[in-house]
Image (cartoon, helix red, strand yellow):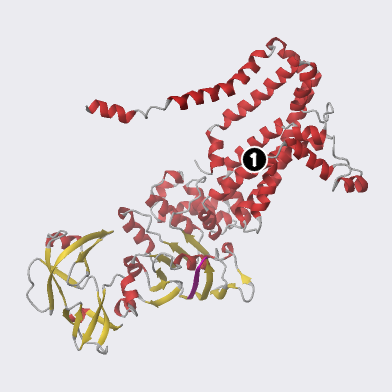
Amino acid sequence: MTSQRTRRRRTAPRTPVPIVALAVIAVVFFALPLLALVLRVPWSDVGDLFTASAPREALLLSLLTSVIATACALVLGLPLAWVLARTQLPGRHVIRAVCTLTMVLPPVVAGVALLAALGRRGLIGASLNDWFGIRLPFTTPAVIIAQVFVAMPFLVLTVESALHSTDRTVEDAARTLGASPWTVIRRVTLPAVRPAILSGLVLTWARALGEFGATVTFAGNFPGTTRTLPVATYLALESDVDQALLMSVLLMVVSFVVLVSMRDRWTGAIGGRR
Amino acid sequence: MSVHGRIIVRVGDCRIDVPIDIASGTTVALIGPNGAGKTTVLRCLAGLQPLDDGRLVGADGVWDDPGAGVFVPPQHRRVAMMFQQHALISHLNVRDNVAFGPRSRGVGTTAANQRAADVLARVGAAHLIARRVTDLSGGEAQRVALARALAADPEVLLLDEPLAALDAAARPAMRRLLAADDLPTRVIVTHDPIDALTLADQIMVIDDGALVQAGSPRELVDTPRSAYVAEILGLNPLSGVLTGDQLLIGGYPLTVGAHTVADGDVVAVVRPRSVSLHRSRPEGSPRNVWSTRVEAIERSADRVRVRLGAPLPLVVEVTEGGLAALDIGTGDEVWASVKASEIAVFPN
């Protein structure tokens, strides 16, 4: 009798069969396409991927633009997260909604919006063209702008959440100890939210790397200047399926590495606490 | 450093209006119930909460004067604040936390680290210097927090419930540290009357954002201006009707000493230490002797408070040794006595 009781205490209650069954279907649903991708790849041609100029060009362009976009997101996103988390600015809920909308917006719409603003006849684009002769659409900077536009919200939300959950009395203590506002930010607040900043950066970078819809719409697909790896992958499907498969696997591996390296850290940061 | 003026500030629904008069080198205790505004007063002194109205003037000049548009931010006041939950910087180790103040004020790394070591030694925490703050016990963390505040070399030390987060075993040591003679001017927020009475030169009783009474511990104990002050100081206030030297409390008669209070409704104050407890009916002089039961025995830090039942709901303070000699427990019958001269009465 006692042994039965202890055994029951140790094991979790049995999970109902329908839940297990549906969960298994969900796992298969995710794993099957990824497995198919890996199996279909012509592994013998992997060498070609890096010798052929088109995929290599696309990969380099993707890496370059996504890293610059991530840096831009950091420079702009940190102050934005700060303002959202730490000020009593009226209407900051509206500001937050506006600044994170692109995260849920169809990327094509984001691209069209960028065209409307920065296109040659756009709201600002027309003036840029007339006064400075600057034409952004279909250039490498346009790729970066598109990536920042859709990816920055990941950084903003992650860091804002962390800023909300930091212990403000620690900052107060630092201030009474003689620290200037800048010193408090540099030596107390930023180190405290460092894990969240790192998570936000990785998420932002992964989103920028995978950006497709807004990039194609606003930047087009010119080889060498705007044809990023996702765009090249989509185009290759029509001409060279094997190459598309190889590039897809490449993107998948990068994403997988990112996910594994984050593991529990990102759920912690987004949830606000561990 | 002396600080004086008047703090007027609104925080949420609570309006605070408290006169401030802190003499240089003294210890001032702010006592009152939760939500009374004690911590807000401390934050105003620190500069973490700007005033809405009123004025704060330190010995070195005006700190805060909204009318004149003057506000000295925290880092330019020579104050350091110690928080209830120590508020140590978790990614820095103990030494770097303590060196944070000097470093922020431009002291070089070597000198700041030396200062950290010195101050840690002074609070008996030299052995903690290389530890991570996340590995410290509550008592250790609070010591380090005190060291960090002192290392900033403040003229005024603000302490928000410095003992509340500590367990009973860690309190006496912290209490001794806070009572040290060589500390700067201190303002201590507490809800514990014993701490206020033992640590402070001046006590400010605050309730609902207002100063109820200020004075030395002696003055407050001898002449609490209201039943509320007596209550908050743990002085056993009892309402009754006075006729000459006879006081009727809920039908039970007591004899009181000389007084100048008119007959009628009064509040009587019986200090917890002036009541004696006995196993059997005591012989001798006390005029007020009665039999009662022990309702509860409470231990806080290094003293014992015995709560008595009908006819007089009094709290009696005894030493641990005194309690052991009496050999009484909760529910036991006990005789209590108090001298007439130990019962103070105030008009209600």
Q: Is residue B270 above or below residue B179?
A: below
Report if residue B14 lies within the magenta region: yes
Query: Horizontally, is B208 left or right of A171 in the view?
Result: left
Type of the residue with mark 1: Phe
Q: Is residue B184 visible?
A: no
Location of residue A249 (image quadrant):
top right
Q: Nearer the viewer, residue B246 or B155?
A: B246
Characterize the magenta stretch by its predominant secondary structure: strand
Residue A163 against residue A5 in the figure, above or below = below
A165 shown above or below B331: above
Toward the viewer: A162 or A172?
A162
Horizontal relation, residue B256 to residue B124: left or right: left
Residue B131 appears in which quarter of the rendering? top left
Answer left or right for B225 relative to A3.
Answer: right
Give the secondary structure at mark 1: helix
Instruction: Please tell me in which quadrant of the rendered image residue B53 appears.
Output: bottom right
Instruction: Report if residue B117 lies within the magenta region.
Output: no
Q: State which region is magenta.
A: B12-18
Residue B166 in view of the camera: yes
Which residue, given by chain and number where applicable, does mark 1 sit on? A154
